[in-house]
Amino acid sequence: MARKIKFVLSDLHLGLALPTTKDSKQETVTTEKALVQFLQRIQSENTAKQQEIELILNGDFFDFLQVPAVDTYNPDEAYPMESYADSSQAASLKRLEIIAIQQKEVFQALRDFMHPEFPQRRVTIIKGDHDVSLFWPGVKNRLRKLLEASGERSSLLLFAGEYIKREKIYVEHGHQKAEAVNRYPDFIDPRHPDNPDRLYYPPSSALFINLINDVQHDTWVITGIKPVSNLIWYALSWNFNLAVKMLSHFFSHMSQKDVVADFLEVLENEETRRELSRRYANESKFRQAFHYRVLHYLNLTKPPTETEATKNVLNLLPSEALIIGQTEQEHQQNLLRQAAEDIAKRDKSKVVLFGHTHHPSQQLLKPGHVYINTGSWTRDFTNLSPDMVEALFKGKLELHNTTPRLPYARIDYDDTGEPIIAQLLYYSVSLDPDDETAPNKVNPKPEENKRTGGWLSGLFSI
């Protein structure tokens, strides 16, 4: 029997009200209630089998970016941009108080879960790009009080600055290994280099904040598409003006403004934007050239001077934005897979775990070493058809027509402290509160590492 077990979850994005999930009976249960039930189930296993449990919340467990920094939150009130953009410790504390009220059942379940006596149950929180506010000491201290994890219970709640590397596992959220526009110069200390009283927000976070202030879009749609830059590729296929608006948000918040200054000026000029829109709609070669520039800018690089090599790449580049978007999703997933291989080789970690992409995956790195991405408990739109994504954005597709998944990783250890089983599983919600049976679990086959299009592989090696 395993002596200790670790459960790893990521990307629950707990903030304001989350969408509901549905099962085959067409009854509903909120994602928050599913989490409460999950915690109760593993707590029961801990008691019955006398096994120590560590619950690792691997980034974006909270979503501070979608919560306004106000004293009293009213869901029917529209709040100014500054209430979302202010990243100070004081603003972050206001957001935490709102989250605690909105998610009071989750907070109570976490309090109940943590257990100091044998068999111990403890929680480790790794911050992600949407809950980077956990950097602030005041936020961590307040969270300890809210979860009753101070004093004698303080050891039951741990915080990690960027990752944990111990007991033959490596766990990191993953945004620092993925798309360039989502990375921090220093995620251990994510304060803004020019204003240490504020956090640095990368372009992707700035785009998210701007979009949730746009009443045309629901937060759960924005959160469900990864990488966030993919929103631009989807929008380019059916709403050029919206795509340009997103690009302007991205570029205006880039620290490397010199890279995009000329392009940003073109995008923000109404006359040149109209000409861009006309040519983009009618000229295939122009679309290819436009995509080429956007791809470089989203990777914080300038398009190289035109040569025969660049012409060859340009000719291979799809003129359809959706194809680029889909390939970019695969590319970001492959980046994390490659990072996992490097970490397993460097640190001898037997299990490497990321989140961030919202795409659950289990892949063998080499015999005895596995990579697991724990996906997300929000709606995953990664594999939706382009038509369905467009329908979601335009409000023509109901939420329950998309399939929810509740993935998590479980790692069992033997008596010597070696991880012996590491699995990606899916929690099956019981709609009967008196049902004491164990949750159904699925151990999917390792997914093959998809090969990214050749045009993307060669784009930045010229």
Image (cartoon, rainbow, N blue to C red):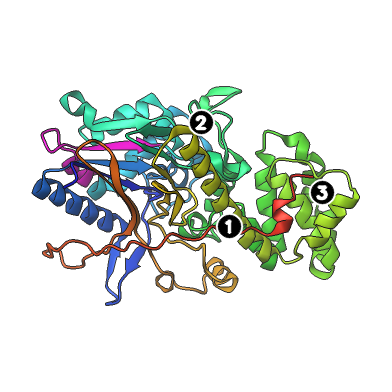
**Alpha carbons under labels 1 and 3: distance apart:** 30 Å
* Residue assigned mark 1: 330
Residue 187, label in figure = 2
* Residue assigned mark 3: 266
Residue lying furthest front in this view? 367
**Residue 249 shown in magenta:** no
Residue 402 is left or right of residue 105, and the answer is right
**Image quadrant in which you'd find residue 19:** bottom left
Residue 447 is left or right of residue 270, and the answer is left
Q: Earlier in the sequence, mark 2 or mark 1?
A: 2
Q: Amino acid at mark 2?
A: Phe
Which residues fall within the magenta stretch? Answer: 107-126
Vertical order, 95 against 445 (above or below):
above
Residue 326 is situated, as x and y percent measured from the top left of the image, at 61, 62
Vertical order, 214 against 140 (above or below):
below
Is there CB contact under 8 Å for labels 2 and 1?
Answer: no
Tell me the residue at 55%/68% (across/down): 389
**Alpha carbons under labels 2 and 3: distance apart:** 32 Å
* Crowd rating for badge 3 (residues with CA inside 10 Å; few <14, some 14–19, many 20+): few
**Alpha carbons under labels 2 and 1: distance apart:** 24 Å
Residue 228 is situated, as x and y percent measured from the top left of the image, at 57, 52
Q: Amino acid at mark 1?
A: Glu
Q: Earlier in the sequence, mark 1 or mark 3?
A: 3
Q: For the residues carrying marks 2 and 1, which lies nearer the camera in this image?
A: 1
Q: Nearer the viewer, residue 168 or 21?
A: 168
Q: Earlier in the sequence, mark 2 or mark 3?
A: 2
Tell me the residue at 41%/42% (across/down): 59
Q: Nearer the viewer, residue 445 or 155?
A: 445
